[in-house]
Image (spheres, rainbow, N blue to C red):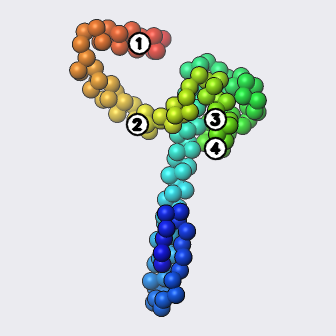
Amino acid sequence: MVVNSIRKVEYVNINLPIHWFINLLKIRIIIRTTQEVNDMKELDLLGKRIKELRKNRRFSQEQLAEKAGISSKYVSRIEMGHHFPSIGILGKLGHILDVELKDFFEFAHLEKSAKQLKTDIRKMLDGADVEKLKLAAKVLKTLLR
């Protein structure tokens, strides 16, 4: 069996015991299933990130949909991780939300628990001088109102 970079599988004409062939098929199924799970996780995170950016701009789903020329139902499906928007739709959403395309894929913070996030914030604040601490306090006070 030869596997190239585009995951095309070619079978070479050799005599393999049947249990080897079955094991190879099982491995292929496991790889495909793992990739699908990872894709679903990323799609879910993309949807959460789009929702986060929309809420930061204080748009409802309906307002965002109207500005993008799509249905609010489609926006809902994107945010729930049920649909992956085309690059054209992502471009429109980025323009409306005033973010770059790369910003849609910065969702590492969405994968962390509240405890992990608090730990990360404490670490950032540990090395800050007084002026940066004052600024951080103002920003947090504004965000948490």
Q: CA distance from mark 2 to mark 1?
A: 21 Å
Lower sequence index among marks 3 and 2: 3
Query: Three-letter amino acid code at disc 3?
Result: Leu
Q: In front: 111, or 87? A: 87
Task: Kindly state the secondary structure of the residue where label 4 is placed.
Answer: loop
Q: Mark 1 Cα within 10 Å, few/some/many (few <14, many 20+)?
A: few
Whether residue 39 sits left or right of residue 129 in the image: it is right
Q: Which mark is residue 84?
A: 4
Q: CA distance from mark 3 to mark 2?
A: 24 Å
Read off the residue under disc 1. 139
Q: CA distance from mark 2 to mark 4?
A: 22 Å
Q: Nearer the viewer, mark 2 or mark 4?
A: 4
Q: CA distance from mark 4 to mark 3?
A: 9 Å
Q: Residue at x 35, y 13 (%)?
A: 136
Three-letter residue code for mark 2:
Lys
At 51% from the left and 75% from the top, the residue drawn is: 25
The three-letter amino acid code for the residue at tag 1 is: Val
Label number found at residue 90: 3
> In the figure, 20 relative to 93: above or below?
below
Q: Is residue 76 visible?
A: no
* Label 2 vs 1, first from the N-terminus: 2
